Image (cartoon, helix red, strand yellow):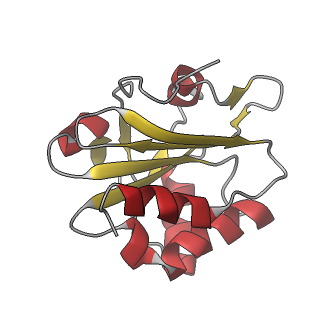
Amino acid sequence: MGVQIGDEAPDFELVDQTRQPVRLSDYRGKKHVLVVFYPLTFTGVCEGEMCGIRDAIDNFRNDEVETLAISVDAPPTHARWAAEQGFEFPLLSDFWPHGEVARTYGVFNEQAGVALRGTFLVDKDGRVVYTDRNPIPEARDQEAWKRALKELGAT
């Protein structure tokens, strides 16, 4: 079943595209965090979703909210993709142990070896206040994310 609304968000530390560690708990008391799991870098639907974040970045990264995108890809892959697409938000690597954070959140597809499209909005207190999960081929409704952020006063 995985992480549900009302749960305390499991903490994690992963490295971003610049190989800097990013820990979810570092945002506690400071910012809401939109945690966006995606299957693979350099793939059509994933690129469309990440470009959607990039193109509406003021909604997803500001004084009240940070967006952390997570896949099983390695940091060098994330770095190249971020440079090519102009992604300035953290792309985190759940590379090793392979998919461990996605498993913790209940969105790892064991058969495919990648994360499903899972989204978790974590409030400043560390509680999950919104989730959505889509199968790998289905893009998510980012307008729903914006509404959830607006309810928290983050946009």
Which residue appears at 65% of the width and 30% of the height?
A: 107
154 lies above or below 35: below
Which residue appears at 49% of the width and 42% of the height?
A: 130
48 lies above or below 151: below
Point out residue 57 in the picture as x, y percentages from the top left corner: 43, 75
Query: 87 or 128, which lies in front?
Result: 128
Which residue appears at 70% of the width and 60% of the height?
A: 46
Point out residue 67 in the picture as x, y percentages from the top left corner: 40, 57
* Res. 13 visible in picture: yes
51 lies above or below 140: below
Point out residue 50 in the picture as x, y percentages from the top left corner: 59, 66
- Residue 27 as seen in the image, left or right of residue 143: left
Quadrant where the C terminus lies? bottom left
Count of numbered circles on the image: 0
Query: 40 or 24, which lies in front?
Result: 24
* Res. 17 visible in picture: no
Quadrant where the N terminus lies? top right
- Residue 25 as seen in the image, left or right of residue 83: left
Task: Point out the residue furthest to the front here.
Answer: 151
92 lies above or below 13: below
Task: Point out the residue furthest to the top here.
Answer: 1
Point out residue 72 in the picture as x, y percentages from the top left corner: 60, 40
Which residue appears at 35% of the width and 49% of the height?
A: 33
